[in-house]
Image (cartoon, rainbow, N blue to C red):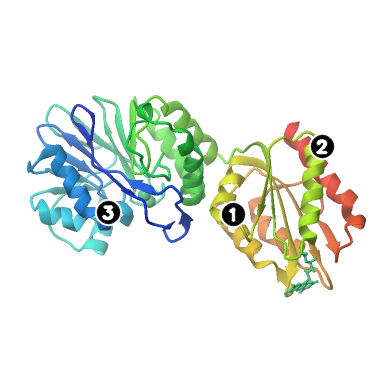
């Protein structure tokens, strides 16, 4: 598929993988994007998951026939993109691999040594004829070797995983040719699940890329962005600053419905006080991928769970460790919990989230057995206080 003169899309769709990185659900599949820049010399930008090599090669040959490829630009070494390096080298033995010092350490470790190599540093340029490519290192977005490749004459940014999203491509590739509506949620989920831990590094990358006149973003997953570039960049900017929108996420665990009654009570009070966006998630039922995405998106967060065998209800402990490891900041926070003989849940929620430095609105609300009456007012106060703080 030709995106513009001299630029071909040669990526593939994966519509059968259930869990990306064996962690994140893919209800709409995922694409592994790869691009061919055709000039006097030809550059292939990234490869695809090795399971799709046959289709990948077919697409390359559709684009350029049996012409040799001069360069393979390796922006990112995660195997969903680097997996076909060895097979590409087999079919194109004269190809020169292009990467930075960290890239080649990983090439050695994953695929063994050998073949032509061109080691580039930050800011270096590679001429393809009358067009050139420049390389910009953006370490830890989300691996240490990560870089992006830019074509200054036509403003094309090959951004690797940055600005990528879940969801296979359904025929069209460019944002101008497709209905992008389903991809925006998937971009938040991709960002928060995969890149979310590295907000400061993403901020650095955005500053570094700001001077480039970007007209087209060719990432490794999801659509190619042109007219929607400002929206894509501003979404990444907000998410990497951990700036949530006005809504509230109430996430609870509950075995027999008691903790859930507290959650309902808090939600009602927040709604009565004017919060329109309230997302409720059961930590046992909703895949954490979606809960993490919702928490990245909203500024209010209330967490509640029962005590289980002297500890915090396990699914909530897992979720909290996922949140803490992503360094989520700037949340208005409240928590609640329940117990029957010796409560531990709220204490552990507070302990586990201490590192996040969230703005804790109230002391935790703790219910013994099913005695909602005794905590109802405290639950309502938490909901109201959250509403006021969200809307102030
Ligand atoms: C398997 C199991 C283990 C529990 N362990 C404790 C415990 O160690 N300490 C305690 O005070 N309550 C414990 N409880 C009681 C629950 O924390 C309490 O009933 C809570 O209100 C249940 O909330 P839920 O109705 O939202 O599931 C346990 C309950 C179950 C089912
Ligand atoms: Fe990656
Ligand atoms: Fe990727």
Left or right: where 71 falls relative to 156: left
Left or right: where 307 falls relative to 90: right
- Label 3 crowding class (10 Å Cα cut-off): few <14, some 14-19, many 20+? many
Eyeballing the image, is 206 above or below 48? above
Q: Which numbered marker is on residue 323?
A: 1
Contact between labelled residues 2 and 3, with CB atoms less than 8 Å apart: no
Residue at 84% across, 73% down = 341
Q: Which numbered marker is on residue 272?
A: 2
Eyeballing the image, is 137 above or below 375? above
Residue at 88% across, 57% down = 372
Q: Residue furthest bottom?
A: 309
- Label 1 crowding class (10 Å Cα cut-off): few <14, some 14-19, many 20+? many
Q: Looking at the rendering, which quadrant does residue 316 occupy?
A: bottom right
Residue 355, percent across and down? 64, 55
Residue 5, percent across and down? 19, 26
Q: Which numbered marker is on residue 82?
A: 3
User: Does the Cβ of the disc 2 residue fall within 8 Å of ligand 1?
Assistant: no
- Secondary structure found at label 3: helix
Q: Looking at the rendering, which quadrant does residue 130 occupy?
A: top left
- Label 2 crowding class (10 Å Cα cut-off): few <14, some 14-19, many 20+? some
Chain-order first, disc 1 or disc 3: 3
Eyeballing the image, is 326 above or below 385? below
- Label 3 to label 2, Cα distance in Å? 52 Å
Query: Number of numbered discs present?
Result: 3
Chain-order first, disc 3 or disc 2: 3
Contact between labelled residues 2 and 1, with CB atoms less than 8 Å apart: no
- Secondary structure found at label 1: helix
Q: Quadrant of the C terminus?
A: top right
Left or right: where 268 falls relative to 54: right
């Amino acid at each position: 598929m030709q995106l513009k003169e001299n630029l071909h899309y040669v990526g593939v769709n994966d519509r059968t993988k259930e869990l990306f990185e064996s962690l994140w659900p893919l209800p709409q599949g995922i694409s592994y994007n790869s691009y061919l820049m055709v000039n006097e010399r030809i550059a292939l930008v990234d490869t695809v998951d090795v399971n799709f090599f046959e289709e990948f090669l077919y697409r390359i040959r559709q684009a350029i026939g049996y012409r040799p490829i001069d360069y393979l630009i390796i922006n990112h070494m995660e195997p969903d993109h680097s997996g076909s390096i060895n097979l590409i080298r087999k079919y194109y033995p004269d190809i020169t691999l292009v990467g930075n010092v960290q890239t080649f350490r990983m090439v050695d470790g994953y695929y063994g040594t050998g073949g032509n190599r061109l080691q580039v540093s930050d800011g270096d340029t590679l001429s393809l004829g009358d067009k050139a490519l420049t390389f910009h290192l953006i370490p830890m977005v989300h691996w240490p070797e990560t870089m992006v490749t830019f074509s200054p004459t036509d403003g094309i940014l090959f951004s690797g995983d940055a600005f990528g999203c879940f969801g296979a491509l359904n025929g069209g590739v460019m944002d101008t040719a497709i209905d992008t509506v389903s991809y925006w949620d998937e971009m938040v989920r991709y960002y928060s699940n995969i890149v979310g831990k590295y907000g400061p590094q993403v901020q650095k990358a955005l500053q570094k890329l700001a001077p480039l006149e970007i007209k087209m973003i060719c990432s490794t997953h999801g659509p190619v962005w042109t007219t929607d570039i400002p929206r894509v960049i501003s979404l990444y900017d907000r998410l990497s600053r951990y700036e949530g929108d006005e809504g509230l996420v109430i996430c609870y665990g509950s075995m027999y419905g008691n903790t859930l009654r507290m959650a309902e009570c808090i939600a009602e009070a927040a709604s009565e006080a004017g919060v329109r966006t309230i997302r409720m998630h059961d930590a046992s039922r909703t895949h954490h991928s979606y809960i993490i995405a919702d928490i990245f998106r909203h500024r209010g967060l209330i967490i509640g769970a029962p005590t289980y065998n002297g500890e915090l209800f396990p699914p909530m402990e897992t979720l909290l460790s996922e949140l803490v490891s992503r360094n989520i900041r700037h949340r208005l926070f409240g928590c609640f919990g329940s117990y029957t003989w010796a409560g531990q849940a709220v204490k552990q929620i507070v302990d586990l989230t201490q590192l996040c430095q969230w703005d804790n609105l109230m002391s935790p609300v703790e219910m013994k057995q099913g005695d909602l009456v005794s905590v109802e007012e405290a639950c309502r106060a938490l909901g109201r206080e959250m509403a006021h703080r969200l809307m102030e």
